[in-house]
Amino acid sequence: MLLTRAEMTLDFDGNRLQPEPDRAILQWIFDQFLYGEVTGIQVGKWLYDAPDLDSARFLAKQAIEELQHVGNFLHIMRMLGLRPGKPHAAVRFLATSMMAKTWPEHVAMEMATGEGFVLMAFYAVIDTLDHPEAVEILTRAVRQEEGHVAFGEQQTMRLCANDPGLRRELLGLSLVWRWGVGRL
């Protein structure tokens, strides 16, 4: 990955999330994680549109991992005494209405950038949640998410190396995307 875990980690000054007193925030966090992973079914569309066999293989593996994460988050929620709830409107919008239209947009915006944001959120929960079993499950999921980000970064760099105009297009799209997310 282009950024290290240290570069993607926030300083929480030793603060910890406790299962009982922080129940409401944990409910909100895991609802967003769960919904985000459920949208991993979109990988099927990209599997169909993959530009080559290696990309298709990667996406097939990613689809399985996303579904495993759904099961993992349901398990974590049960351990914490939580029941699945509703996702925030921003998460729902980002996971459905902002779906990429092309392979370059998908690997740059959804995999390298979007999965990168997810990865940072996973790191934050791992660094703060006071529940060793849930942290262990999240730590396993992080390794898979890191692979998703790395694939998106590698594909984006390869595509942009062959097409300088594409680099400008994706950077422009990135600015629009950031503006839209900021407005949400």
Image: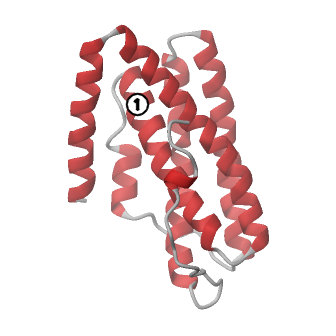
Q: Viewer-proximal residue, 95 or 135?
A: 135
Q: Residue at x 23, y 23 (%)?
A: 168
Dividing the picture into quarters, in which one does residue 182 lie? bottom left
Figure check: 169 above or below 120: above
State how the image is colored: secondary structure
Q: Position of residue 105 (x, y in %)?
A: 36, 27
Q: Which residue is mark 1?
A: 108
Going by the picture, which residue comes out furthest to the bottom? 21
With 162 as the anchor, is 64 left or right in this view? right
Quadrant hosting residue 174: top left
Task: Report x, y in % for residue 133.
Answer: 79, 69
Disc tally is 1
Q: Nearer the viewer, residue 183 or 121?
A: 121
Is 184 on the left or on the right of 126, as rendered?
left
Badge 1: residue crowd in 10 Å (few <14, some 14–19, many ≥20): many
Residue 119's x, y, as percent?
54, 51
Q: Is residue 110 positioned above or below 178 on the image?
A: above
Q: Report the residue at 55% width, 75% height from top.
A: 27
Q: Residue flagged by tag 1: what amino acid is it?
A: Ala
Q: Which of the 4 image quarters holds residue 139?
A: bottom right
Q: Secondary structure at mark 1?
A: helix
Q: Which quarter of the figure is the C terminus placed in?
A: bottom left
- Comparing 139 with 64, the one in front is 139
Q: The N terminus is located in which quarter?
A: top right
Query: Residue shown at 51%/42% (left/top)?
Result: 3
At horizontal 64% and vertical 74% (from top left) the residue drawn is 129
Q: Position of residue 24 (x, y in %)?
A: 52, 83
